[in-house]
Image: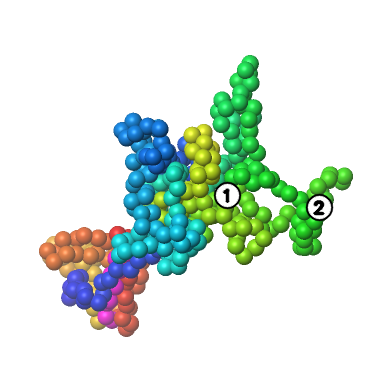
Amino acid sequence: MSAYKHLNRQDVFVTDYQAKKNWLATGSYLDTFGLSTLKAYKEQVYPKKYPHDLEEGRHVTLTYRSISHLYYTGSHTEVLGAGTFSGSRDWNQQTTLSMSGSRFLKNHAAVISLPKDVFGTHIVRNSFILQPNPDLVQEDGISLEDYVIDNYAADVILGVNEYVEQFETLYGSSGFDIVTEDYLVSESFYVTESIEGDPGQFMDIDQNQQRIEIVDDGYGRLVISGSDSYYSRPLRVVGDIIYSHGMAIVTDEEVANYYHTYANSGSLLVKWKSNLPIYTYNVHCQVKSSEMNHTFNPSVTTGSFGQLADNVSGSHFNPYITTVGLYNDANELIATGKVSTPVLKSPDVDMTFAVKLDI
C-alpha cells in the first residue's frame, strides 16, 4: 500500500494555445503601452547631419538607415513596381507574393513601433488600424481628426489656429463628391428619416468609399481603408507592416507628414491584436482500480500505536481524493493540484486525474 506512484513518459507532455488579445492605444496609453512614434529622414534631404539630427530625442537619419537596412535595401519596387527582392538575405517578407506598391522607401517616413510585450510573437494579420482619434478635441475646439499645423496660420490676437484641413480632404483627396451613383445605390442601404423634415438622411454613400483609417491588408501592406483594386476606389498603398517585429512604417511622404502631426499632438489612435502562445504542462495521473484504496490521513487513526479506526478498516471503506501532488526524483513536492469537490475513489474503475500547469 503506497500513496506514491511513478509516472510514465507518455503521461507528461506540453501543449500550447495561441491566445489573442485586442489592444487600443491613444493619448497617455501610447506611453503606457510603450509605443514609439518615430520620424525617419534620408540624410541627403535632412538639413542637419548626424549626430545633430535629433527630434524629440531620436536621431531621424539613424532611424531611416535602420529601417532601410532591415526592410528595404535590395527591393526592386522602384524598377519592377512590386515588392520583389534579390539575393538570399532575409528581408522579413510577410508573404511569398509580389505585392504591388510594397517595400518602397522614399525620402522620409513615419514609424510606429510596438514593444514585444504588447504584440507577443506577432501582430495578427488584418487587425492593425492606425488613425487620428476622432473623440479628442483641442482647447480651441478643433477636432484632432482635423489636420492642423500649430502656428502655421494663427489669429494675431487670440492665437488660435486658422488653417485647419478637414478630414474629408486628407491625404490629397478632393473631398466627398456626391455623384448620381452614390444616391440610393441599394434599397438595403436606405436610411429611414428619424426627424421629420431633417434633410440629408436619405443619402447613401458608396460602400467602397475610402476612409480615414490606415489598415493592414493581411499581406504586409498598409493601405487606406476602403481603397481596393477590385472596386471603383483605387487601391492606395501607404506603407508596410512587419507583423513579427511590431513595426508599422508609413512610407507615403504625404501621409507620413500627417502622422508626424498626430503623434506630436497626442491624437494618434492605434488598434491591433496580439498573439501569444500559452504553454501548458499536462500530467496525466492514472490510478488503477486496485490502487490507493486506503488513506494515510492521521484523522483515521486511533490509540497510541496509530491503529486504523473501525469505520475505515473494513473492505467497504473507500477514500475521497482531494489533492494530487507532483514530486521530483528526490521526493520533493514541486506542485499540487486540487479538485473542485472531493472525488470518491472507485475500487472497480480505473481513474485518471489530469493536472495542468500554466508555464
Magenta range is 280-289
Q: Nearer the viewer, residue 84 or 325?
A: 84
Q: Nearer the viewer, residue 306 or 60?
A: 60
Quadrant of res 131: top right
Q: Amino acid at mark 1?
A: Glu
Q: Nearer the viewer, residue 225 or 252?
A: 252
For label 2, the residue is 202
Position of residue 182 relative to residue 155, above or below, is below
Residue at the extreme bottom: 348
Q: Amino acid at mark 2?
A: Phe
- In x, y percent, where is residue 211? 62, 51
Q: Which mark is residue 213?
A: 1
CA gap between label 1 and label 2 equals 25 Å
Question: Which quadrant: the N terminus?
Answer: bottom left
Give the residue at x 63% y 30%. 163
Q: Nearer the viewer, residue 238 or 270?
A: 238
